[in-house]
Amino acid sequence: MLIAGKVHYPPNGWWEDLLFYLQNNHVLLSAFCAHPAHPYTRCRRSLVLLSSVTFAFFLNAVFIAAVQTTLLRSILEVKATLSKATIGTIVQMMWDVPSGMVGACTCANASCLPSCVVRLCHCVSCAILACHLYLGILYGIVGVVILALEKSERTEVDEVSLEFAHAKVLAWATSVPFLALIFGCSRYFEKRKSAKDVVAHWQKSAKAPVDLD
């Protein structure tokens, strides 16, 4: 059911399903708390987390550089903090989601397909994940270069580390409501489809001829 993308697992309630969804889809939580049936192994989930962290470092470096190269620093520092919680989180999720979608590729995990097709799709998903990881590391290196070119107190190692940790924790925390919204919509439409299927099956059964013999 994880591979099929299900979000509702009877008899679980809304909160139980939400917790299970976060444990298997949140970048940080899924690295440590995912279900054993998760389509990604723990090693691959750790690589996704590494890619997320390096890309986040790049975003943080861009925010720091944007503040440093502007005259209205006091105003932009406030805006930069807000941006990390909004724009930064959205961009981060746009970066993280594709890697999770590749991991849940139905073709790479389907037992009904020929083994050669499954192996091919699995290799393709691994190649895409590798490209995603290398891109994340490249962005991280670019972030280091950006900070190295900036000459200010805000680019000291301690200051950068503190801002990066603050930004990443903020992004992980603010991604929870976004994931909860996605979960809520997915669960609603999934239960709605299940209800329609039950009604359709009942109507089909009611119209079926009855054998009295």
Image (cartoon, grey):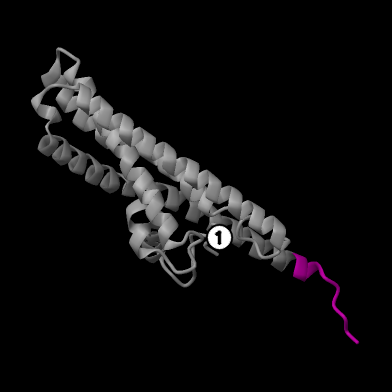
Q: Position of residue 50 (x, y in %)?
A: 35, 48
202 up-or-down from 168: above or below: below
Which residue lies at the image location 39% right of the left edge and 39% below the top edge?
A: 136
The quarter of the displayed image where residue 12 is located: bottom left
In the image, what residue type sits under mark 1? Ile
The quarter of the displayed image where residue 83 is located: top left
Q: Quadrant of the C terminus?
A: bottom right
Q: Position of residue 154 (x, y in %)?
A: 12, 28
60 up-or-down from 183: above or below: above
Identify the main secondary structure in magenta: loop
The magenta-colored residue range is: 204-213
Residue 77 in sight here? yes
Q: Is residue 41 left or right of residue 56?
A: right
Which residue lies at the image location 86% right of the left edge and 73% below the top edge?
A: 209
Which residue lies at the image location 28% right of the left edge and 31% below the top edge?
A: 143
Q: Secondary structure at mark 1?
A: loop
Residue 63 vs residue 196, the one in the foreground: 63
Which residue lies at the image location 64% right of the left edge and 57% below the top edge?
A: 119
134 up-or-down from 19: above or below: above
Residue 31 lies in the magenta stretch:
no
Q: Quadrant of the N terminus?
A: bottom right
**Pointer 1: what residue?**
3
Residue 180 in sight here? no
Q: Position of residue 94 (x, y in %)?
A: 42, 38
